[in-house]
Amino acid sequence: MAGSPSRAAGRRLQLPLLCLFLQGATAVLFAVFVRYNHKTDAALWHRGNHSNADNEFYFRYPSFQDVHAMVFVGFGFLMVFLQRYGFSSVGFTFLLAAFALQWSTLVQGFLHSFHSGHIHVGVESMINADFCAGAALISFGAVLGKTGPAQLLLMALLEVVLFGINEFVLLHLLGVRDAGGSMTIHTFGAYFGLVLSRVLYRPQLEKSKHRQGSVYHSDLFAMIGTIFLWIFWPSFNSALTALGAGQHRTALNTYYSLAASTLGTFALSALVGEDGRLDMVHIQNAALAGGVVVGTSSEMMLTPFGALAAGFLAGTVSTLGYKFFTPILESKFKVQDTCGVHNLHGMPGVLGALLGVLVAGLATHEAYGDGLESVFPLIAEGQRSATSQAMLQLFGLFVTLMFASVGGGLGGIILVSCLLDPCALWHWVAPSSMVGAEKPHRSFPTTTRAPAEATLSGLPPRLPVLRGPSSLAGAWRA
């Protein structure tokens, strides 16, 4: 009993001290190393005979705004489906992304833009930092509800470094093309989180599976995240592609792929659902798989038909993964994938990498013309054949899986050995004053248990929509 007050004080100080230390260390590193680049610095920009309209800011910042909204609003609200973890889903997303974008600016800066003893930053640095934060949030989705904020910050501290190294190896050493991050963002983030979840697995967590359920309003808020991500995904994939035809083509391919994946998701959800009803889990997640699957190949000459086919395949595979593979992953492999990142980011990311292998292998001067240099510069210069580019694309996938798996395992060992109090485990009901715990305002039945006609807190019943002529083929699963 005597140790209880000291342990409580220790738990209370974990997060403040860690935040202060990380922010202080980051600020010192920024002061020593980070400087504006020539397109941002007042003296350097005006030294040349430039028009303000030529500044890259005006071409890249609209895409940055969309990516930024995806990271903080899209990812944050997508994870609020848990009925007793909504505040923490959005709050921890805010915390994790805010730290990751600062730390990744340093890590990526040392690897990509370090010269004359300084890291030079501009609008592209902001976009790259958001990409890295997105990978960390994907990993967060795999361990949502099993980790506290202090653990998440340590996870990001390691993951951002490995993300930067993996990205450097693929894009600069191997010359892999991955504009929308099917490999570097989605595959890496998903499998890092899955391996981390496996290492953090504890048998007692089985007792808290009932807290994984959602309720009407939590599913509704999660759909806000889905819609934000769906709308802005073309900007995500095209944010850093070559200006002009390349960026235009990337946005177009992503646009069609997302539309096809949505129809594929609705079709498969009704097909495999109980009594032919649509499942909100499928709609919230699998409809986004089209954006993931064309991440690598969207800047290539995929063709609109290819984008539609890839998106439809990704939507169906993701839906089937939620229905059949996720239970196997938990029961056989002891991987508790809270948000189903394996189905939304993992499998579609791998499919996207393989699609990139195929499209890169088909690249010819006739198909790309003078645009070949902006997509495959080494092929255009004669230093590499299309076949060798395809093989390196495939090798890049294996390198990513290796970095993600080893990094996730190492991260899990670090978090376990640090003995940090998670303050968020489903089986442990903490006082409402502690970080990670949430005081429920009212108890609602979960959507996995309530009938379709149930009313919640005076709300109208969940009426079936898109009902088929003679069956429940379009009714929402309650």
Image (cartoon, rainbow, N blue to C red):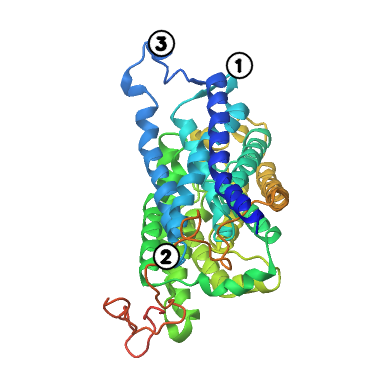
Q: Nearer the viewer, residue 6 or 193?
A: 6
Q: Position of residue 1 (x, y in %)?
A: 65, 59
Q: Is residue 22 visible?
A: yes
Q: Residue at x 43, y 60 (%)?
A: 86
Q: Earlier in the sequence, mark 2 or mark 1?
A: 1
Quick check: 211 left or right of 440? right
| The disc label shown at residue 215, or none | none
Tell me the crowding category of disc 2: few under 14, some 14 to 19, or many 20 or more residues within 10 angstroms, Cα based: many
Q: Is residue 47 above or below residue 311?
A: above
Q: Position of residue 427 (x, y in %)?
A: 58, 68
Q: Is residue 172 above or below residue 276?
A: above
Q: Earlier in the sequence, mark 2 or mark 3?
A: 3
Q: Residue at x 42, y 65 (%)?
A: 262
Kind of residue at disc 1: Gly
Q: Position of residue 229 (x, y in %)?
A: 41, 54
Outermost top residue: 47
Q: Position of residue 128 (x, y in %)?
A: 51, 37
Q: Secondary structure at mark 1?
A: loop
Report the label total.
3
Q: Which residue is mark 3?
A: 43
Q: Is residue 437 above or below residue 467?
A: above
Quick check: 55 left or right of 412? left
Q: Quadrant of the C terminus?
A: bottom left
Tag 2 near tag 1, CB within 8 Å: no
Tag 2 near tag 3, CB within 8 Å: no
Q: Earlier in the sequence, mark 3 or mark 1?
A: 3
Q: Which residue is mark 1?
A: 117
Q: Is residue 432 above or below residue 411?
A: below
Q: Secondary structure at mark 3?
A: helix
Kind of residue at disc 3: Ala
